[in-house]
Image (cartoon, rainbow, N blue to C red):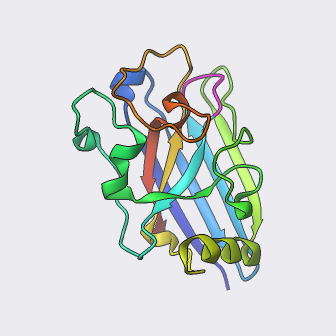
Amino acid sequence: MSQKYVAKIVSLNAAAIGTKAHGTAEFIQNDDTLEIKIEMFDTPANTQHWEHFHGFPDGKDAQIATMDQDVNHDGFVDLPETEPVSGTTMVPFDDAPHQMNIPNDNYPVSDEHGHFSYQMRVPLAALRKKFKEVFGTDDLQLEKRVIYVHGVPESLQLPKTVAGEVGSYDAHVTLPIAVGKIEKD
């Protein structure tokens, strides 16, 4: 039996970054696979875009961040500012989501028009096993998650107040540019 989930992805930080990223995501969960399709438009061009679903390990319903989450009033909602409403980064949409290796260079890169599409078929047993190892449950609870798309060019001037360093990656990589609530279709 399969279950379909969708997300309408809307821009975040558009005024600060100069593009209004938007798109759609579709997740089809079958008995043994999770099929993921994401298509984005008007993202910063020629830029790698980290994308993940975020949520709360305790099953609390995650919500999308808005400019209301800009608690330090620097004009940007950075990754740490999303956590109170959206939870933590959970599953990456890279070349191996089931490995849950968040910081890497294997995410989609937008073209010169700011467009990219991502498709992946993920082995559900492997993803659930890793998810349980990290979060204590194997229930992905997609309807309680949000999807984030991240990434702006290094040339964009960010205030020193913008946080979000992950390993050797700085806030240019992790700055959210779009977000969507995942819902059952």
Using residue 88 as the reference point, say whether residue 127 is left or right of it: right
Quadrant where the image shows the N terminus: bottom right
> How far across and down, in percent of the image, does residue 148 sit?
49, 48
Residue 185 visible from this viewpoint: no
In which quadrant of the rendered view does residue 146 lie? Answer: bottom left
- The structure residue drawn at horizontal position 51% and vertical position 70%, both measured from the top left corner, is 142
Magenta segment, prevailing SS (helix, strand or loop): loop
- The structure residue drawn at horizontal position 76% and vertical position 56%, both measured from the top left corner, is 96
> How far across and down, in percent of the image, does residue 116 sit?
66, 36
Using residue 27 as the reference point, say whether residue 107 is left or right of it: right
Above or below 128: residue 113: above
> How far across and down, in percent of the image, does residue 26 sit?
59, 59
- The structure residue drawn at horizontal position 43% and vertical position 70%, both measured from the top left corner, is 144
Q: What stretch is highlighted in magenta?
A: 42-48
Residue found at the far front of this picture: 167
Q: Does the magenta stretch include residue 45?
A: yes
